[in-house]
Amino acid sequence: MKKCLVFLSGLFVSCAVHAIGIDLNQPTLIRADKIEYDLRNDTIKTIGRAEISNKSGQKMTLSDSYLTRDGRGISGNDIQLWLGAHVYLESDNVKRDGDITIARDATFTACKNCDSFGDAWEISAKKVKHNQDTRMLAFYNMVFRAYDFPILWLPYFDMPDPGVKHKTGFLTPNLASTNKMGTQVNVPFYIYLSDTHDATVTLSYLTRENPLFQMEHRLNMVHSEYRTRGAFTHNRDGENRWYIFNDDIIELGQNARATIFLERASDNTFLQKYGFYGEQPYLDSGARVELFGQSGYVVADAHIFQELRNNARNYSVPDGNILPNIHGVYQTAPLFAETYAIFTGDMLGIVGDGISSQRMIGEARITSPWTLMWGNRLTASVATRYDLYNFDNTTMVNGDIYSGMKNRFLPSGYLEWGLPLLRPSENLTQVLEPRARITFMRHIRDGQFAINNDSVGALLSDATLFSSNRFSGLDLWENGTFADYGLRWSAFDSDGQTIETFLGQSYDFTKREDTDPNSGFHNGQSDYVGRIGYNNMRWLNLYTRFRLAKENLGLRHIENNIVLGTSRNFFNMGHIWSKQFIDAQTQAESIHEFAGGVGVAITDRWSVRWNAIYNMTNDRFQQHTGALYYEHPCYYLSFGYRRDNAIKEDYVGTTTFQFKFGISIDGKHY
């Protein structure tokens, strides 16, 4: 009987006993027409057909076998071996002497009975030799077959046995094709250094561009881990182009952790052109140290940025490198009742082209929450904050260039009231909660000193109401006294279905300076903001956030998100629309964008997915991707594309096609 050898199962059949992990010192069942046990030589001999099985369910059948108790000597004929639900081996004859096992006329498949019309793939060989010492398999005169059709013949081939978790060698190549650089063949080479240390080097051959070299390095230690990846090419224009990303995490005991991160590229378009771009607007390099305890924490970090955008607007991101940023928080135990204090400190240094600024901020806040009669909730809070700035050749809000010291002092406090009104029933529980807060602050004429520190600006939304600082960052100050108020209704049932609505507004009692017409804040009443959400916890999740003009309830801003379906059949869509103004009277071009995806399971094994971002303002796709997937128990393949319509410097949008194929054994991809 001519059949097979299992070498990719997780345990190689190096001998009849070791092959299926059977240890005769462990509970093992041997059935045979006749069994002879030699007490003197400690050997077992079976006559006729025999079956050996272990407690994990693996089993082997063979005839006329001979095996020693330690498994170092074995021989048998007509061997059939099951190492898993679909992992199967057969061989005419197996013999083992010491560390060397030889199987003749052997065949292996990890797809036994996966398809009614045949095994997806199998490998057969005239002779297979396994060396237990080197853990290597040598195949002589081997044929790789797909559905019993011969695909590849090799006179000799060797590989590590599946008991080896890591082994240096080539991995499965994959193909890609772009309309700018031609066909790309990626050949990865895996380098094993230890069980916790390895690397992958990939050579990418491109038909219309010079080769690309890629590298990924991984190292795990007891209290740290290190990850590095990068790529390099010397292109046909004679330029050296590259990128390197690094992320290291080091545990410094139970209460401290350090992180080192590096993101750098040779230029602004390399990542995008070669497919490494993840839509990041800038690259961030630096380090972070975190100290944390039961009642507080301190974070110290530094950042050096590399801008990737063509037109990074001022006022939108910090302009310069952050060297350093230190933030600390400490919260006390309850002082009385539920009253507690929080102490916060911040230090920030920003260094740019010929400019620099440093700041120190300290704040102390006492908060006292109370639950009163009939369910009324009242929270009172008082705080004091002091800022000290040092500017060097820095552009101020009024346009002046300033060097020197500035300081400001801000006492503040708020009083917040809420009344959750609960109405439970057999099928549905409803909650109606009115909520209001009044915040008192010192009025300062200059709400912000300098541009491009840490404040992006002001944008009113339901998430910024009932906050001590409705602006982003710490440099932009709230100014004077204001009130927030709103009404929330929600309901939920025993099946987990939830629905929620909210509508609120802010009112400024103090006149604002230079109010941004797009922020939603105005002197006096602000625009109205709200949200609506529904989730049935099975196949539907809806969420909408919006802003309505205070004058006529006209729509000023809306964000929608919908998810329909399950993990294999789904539809999701995100949408944002925002009316923009240059000033209070002049309307500019609106922001209007769709992002969505769809997935369809055509059969149990075939599926297709598609994602896109469409800019309605410019009436064009920013990008779209799609792929066809086939998931077989024994192998997998995919064919996909990516279209990027970005235009930046020397980069003009490309279309990339990619093909992947790999073998699966017991659900694991190789």
Image (cartoon, rainbow, N blue to C red):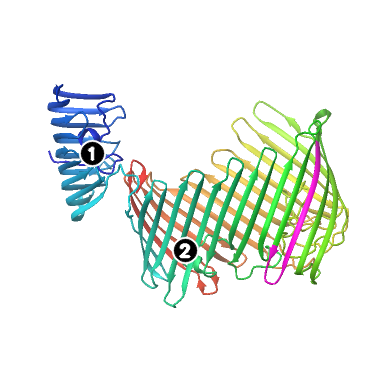
**Left or right of 213: which side holds 546?**
right
Q: Is residue 355 magenta?
A: yes
Residue 305 visible in the current orientation: yes
Q: Please tell me which residue lies in front, 407 or 122.
A: 407
Q: Quadrant of residue 425?
A: top right
Q: Quadrant of residue 98?
A: top left
Q: Amino acid at mark 2?
A: Gly
Q: Is residue 537 magenta?
A: no
Question: Height in image: 128 above or below 656?
Answer: above
Q: Amino acid at mark 1?
A: Val
Q: Earlier in the sequence, mark 1 or mark 2?
A: 1
Are the two marked residues, 1 and 2, in contact with CB atoms closer than 8 angstroms?
A: no
**Left or right of 640: which side holds 383?**
right
In this figure, which residue is indicated by the disc labeled 1?
A: 13
**Left or right of 149: which side holds 56?**
right
Q: Position of residue 473 (x, y in %)?
A: 73, 56
Mark number, residue 275: 2
**Left or right of 598: which side holds 42?**
left
Mark number, residue 227: none
Question: Height in image: 115 above or below 394?
Answer: above
Q: Which residues are magenta?
A: 350-368
Residue visible at 64% across and 37% down? 498
Q: Please tell me which residue lies in front, 183 or 358.
A: 358
Secondary structure type for disc 1: loop
Question: Height in image: 647 above or below 1?
Answer: below
Question: Height in image: 56 above or below 442?
Answer: above
